[in-house]
Image: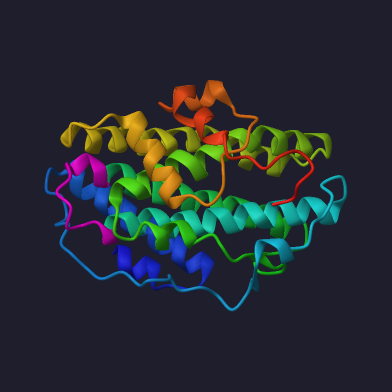
């Protein structure tokens, strides 16, 4: 199931498969007969549609959110993030099927994949209502780098994807909601509010299973988190942080504030 999603290029078809498989998993669990986890070989890089064109992050055009074109670009970037998140959550199931984990681990990531699929579809609906679509603009080429870097390290994957990248979404989404609220874009506000609420759970699942693995190895979660992020995440973490939502998701400040130390001096570009 996971490999089929990862091997599907079209966004709407990928998310339809994702949601159907999630429903099948959930139904099997409700009957007390979970689908066998098994093992598989996921692709190194998931299938992608011909568009959007993927660019170096520095080459992705910057647009002001105060304009209609800027708001479309912002939503397009969110759609691209959600599209990649669908694959990231199925990939953790497929790539680490050989690691002995409780059945709840798979429950959590299937649920995350299902929710990210719905997020992608909601944002695509917003784009289409504004006369655009996913693929109309270029997008960030580096979204899969965290998956490549942590392909052999489940603890590293949990540290970098949900506990760093998705936690960043908790920091920036409230400002995006304000942008669309000021523009009276009710559909976009509603979609972003759902994403904001559900992403807390995704970060929390990452924190839960990261702590589980640390406990199994009798290791200090905070120290291991710092080691994993410094090993696999490229650059320092950047404030401001949404400390309230991060705490709700099981991320205390002493996990992430020490990782801001490597910020470049003011005035120097990265």
- Model colouring: rainbow
Q: Nearer the viewer, residue 40 or 132?
A: 40
Whole-percent x and y of residue 104? 22, 40
User: Residue at the location (59% across, 66% down)?
Assistant: 141
Name the one closer to the observer, 168 or 105. 168
Magenta highlight on residue 46: no
Q: Position of residue 150 (x, y in %)?
A: 36, 56
Above or below: residue 81 compared with residue 215: below
Q: Residue at x 72, y 67 (%)?
A: 137
Q: Is residue 40 left or right of residue 73?
A: left
Q: Quadrant of residue 50?
A: bottom right
Task: Answer whether residue 102 is magenta in the image.
Answer: yes
Task: Using residue 35 as the reference point, say whether residue 111 is left or right of it.
Answer: right
Q: Magenta part of the protein: which range?
A: 94-106
Quarter of the rendering occupied by the N terminus: bottom left
Question: Is residue 241 or residue 87 the one in the foreground?
Answer: 241
For the residue pair 263 and 103, the one nearer the viewer reads as: 263
Residue 270 in the image: above or below residue 221: below
Q: Position of residue 167 (x, y in %)?
A: 51, 37
Give residue 136's position: percent from left, percent from top: 71, 69
């Amino acid at each position: 199931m996971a490999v089929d999603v990862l091997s599907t290029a079209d966004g709407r078809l990928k998310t339809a498969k994702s949601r159907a498989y999630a429903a099948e998993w959930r139904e099997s669990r409700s009957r007390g007969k979970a689908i066998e986890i098994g093992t598989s070989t996921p692709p190194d890089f998931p299938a992608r549609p011909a568009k959007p064109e993927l660019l170096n992050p520095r080459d992705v055009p910057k647009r002001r959110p105060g304009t209609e074109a800027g708001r479309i670009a912002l939503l397009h970037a969110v759609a691209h993030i959600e599209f990649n998140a669908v694959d990231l959550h199925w990939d953790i199931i497929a790539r680490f099927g050989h690691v002995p984990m409780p059945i709840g681990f798979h429950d959590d990531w299937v649920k995350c994949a299902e929710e990210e699929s719905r997020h992608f579809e909601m944002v695509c609906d917003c784009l289409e209502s504004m006369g655009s679509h996913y693929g109309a603009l270029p997008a960030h080429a580096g979204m899969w780098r965290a998956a490549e870097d942590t392909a052999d390290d489940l603890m590293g994957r949990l540290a970098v994807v949900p506990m760093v990248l998705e936690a960043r979404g908790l920091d920036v989404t409230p400002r995006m909601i304000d942008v669309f609220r000021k523009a009276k874009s009710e559909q976009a506000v509603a979609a972003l509010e759902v994403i904001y609420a559900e992403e807390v759970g995704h970060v929390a699942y990452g924190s839960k299973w990261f702590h589980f693995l640390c406990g199994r190895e009798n290791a200090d979660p905070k120290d291991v988190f710092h080691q994993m992020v410094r090993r696999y995440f490229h650059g320092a973490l950047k404030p401001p942080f949404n400390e309230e939502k991060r705490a709700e998701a099981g991320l205390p400040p002493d996990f992430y504030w020490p990782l801001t130390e490597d910020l470049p001096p003011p005035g120097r570009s990265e």
